[in-house]
Image (cartoon, grey):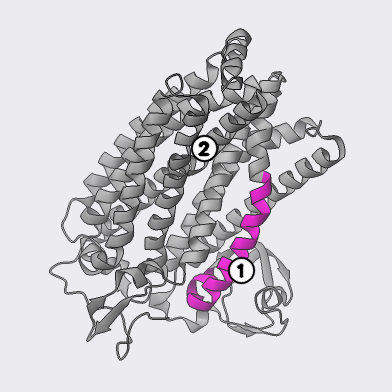
Amino acid sequence: MDVLALPWTGPLQVPLAAAATPADFMAARMQMAFTLGAHIVFACFGIGLPALTVFAEWRGIRTGDPHYLLLARRWAKAMGVLFAVGAVSGTILSFEMGTLWPRFMAVFGPAIGLPFAIEGIAFFVEAIFLGIYLYGWDRLPPKVHVLTGIPIVLGGLASAFFVVTVNAFMNDPAGIRVEDGRVVEVRPLAAMLNQAVPTQTSHMIVAAFLVASFGVASVYAVAMLRGRRDRYHRLGLILPFTVGAVLAPVQFLIGDLAARYVADHQPAKFAAMEGVLRTEAGAPFHLGGIVDGDRMRFAVEIPNGLSLLLRFDPDAVIRGLDSIPPDARPPVAVVHLSFQVMVGIGTLLMGLAAWFALTWWRRRDLPRSPWFLRLTAVSGVLAAIALEAGWVTTEVGRQPWIVHGVMRTADAVNPNPGLTTGLYVVLAVYAVLVTATVVVLRRMTRSRPVPPRVVREEADSYAVV
């Protein structure tokens, strides 16, 4: 692997004209965390919802079932709203990269410019075909119309992939050469295709589909709890929930690979994730628990469990935080808690998926217990919480580095005053943006479905093509 060429061995020395105050530094971190946390949820629907919509329309054309076509039409409207909001929040993030972290962009811009440029192209393709798809329902032949949805799906996937490669570079920098503490050579392709890319991109894309799938299914689960048990609402639950049920165990496997990668390349982050405070052979596995100073409290401890899971050897040595210099350790309590939340919710969703799969295999029907619908009704929120917890684990676990082992976050922040004002402005803007989005989506869900006669006429027009 071509990472940072020797003889350089220490962090990058960035000339500092001034230093940000602690309050401004914290404001910059909070603003970036908040805007990223908000945008990532919208982005997940921008990745997963187009695939669900196109598949529903394809099934409607293929089977002639009008309910699939009705689902596709209604999901397409929600997709348009969420795409617009995601575009706005993503644009804000792009500006923040330069305004909040100008030193990072000045040094590493040549390394991360390529994936950002490709992502921009993918975004434009997605936006163009989204317009064609939304306004082409009654203007294009059905089979042509469904084909216009495929570039939306591919554009969303490409956008997610190339953006996440930037974060992967920040976690495992590659393709740059450093001499005397300065970056003197950058190979953008090598930087983009670093070793962290396979696990990070796949983990994020599958997470996006999980958030979108369980999020959509939860809406119809609420409706079914209120007595709407017709075919339209059943399909609205079954179709996305099936996607989530299939991908939940896949995400578990990808997460296991990602954790092993982190253990090898970011030992401080892994130790914080698992709550390994001291290096030891036969390290125990902590289920739950809260890190209190140099102690783990309230955890269920499985002797030798972590060594066995990570190295397949119950006596393997696992590196702990005591082997990391104090000024290079992440906030272990936050990282461990967020990691436990992510894994715990993922396990719960896997259990819900197994319940659905077993019942469907036995009776070709949904579980009859109201608890299944109740859990499905909150599964969308739980999936989003797991997503946020995963990003907290990734980003906070990398601290104090903005680029792991190369540049510290404190050295990358904008040194000019006034960052706290920017935080308050952004919070106000996002409050309006999120409120408006929720109001619009709630009105859309409360609107009555197309009358059966109209749906049947639409289905007939599809069937003759």
Relative image position of residue 182 (x, y in whole percent): 22, 80
Relative image position of residue 9 (x, y in whole percent): 33, 87
The secondary structure type at the circle numbered 2 is helix
Identify the residue position indicated by label 1 in the image. 296
Instruction: Give the residue at the far left of this rendering.
Output: 17
Amino acid bearing label 2: Leu
Q: Please indicate whether residue 83 sits to the left or right of residue 60 in the image.
A: left
Q: Is residue 105 visible?
A: yes
Dominant SS of magenta comes to: helix
Amino acid bearing label 1: Met
Question: In this picture, is 406 found above or below 125?
Answer: below
User: Residue sitting at 76 percent across and 34 percent down?
Assistant: 371
Q: Is residue 264 magenta?
A: yes
Marks 2/1 in contact by CB < 8 Å: the verdict is no
Question: In this picture, is 149 found above or below 226?
Answer: below
Magenta residue span: 245-272
Circle count: 2
Relative image position of residue 151 (x, y in whole percent): 43, 42
Relative image position of residue 63 (x, y in whole percent): 67, 27
Q: Is residue 434 visible?
A: no
Q: Quadrant of residue 191?
A: bottom left
Q: Please indicate whether residue 29 sits to the left or right of residue 230 in the image.
A: left
Using the image, tell me which numbered label, if any, was put on residue 49.
Answer: 2
The secondary structure type at the circle numbered 1 is strand
Question: In this picture, is 151 found above or below 452?
Answer: below
Using the image, tell me which numbered label, if any, was put on residue 321.
Answer: none
Q: Please indicate whether residue 24 sits to the left or right of residue 320 in the image.
A: left
User: Residue sitting at 58 percent across and 34 percent down?
Assistant: 216
Real-space Cα distance between discs 2 and 1? Answer: 40 Å
Q: Please indicate whether residue 181 sits to the left or right of residue 153 in the image.
A: left
Q: Is residue 424 magenta?
A: no
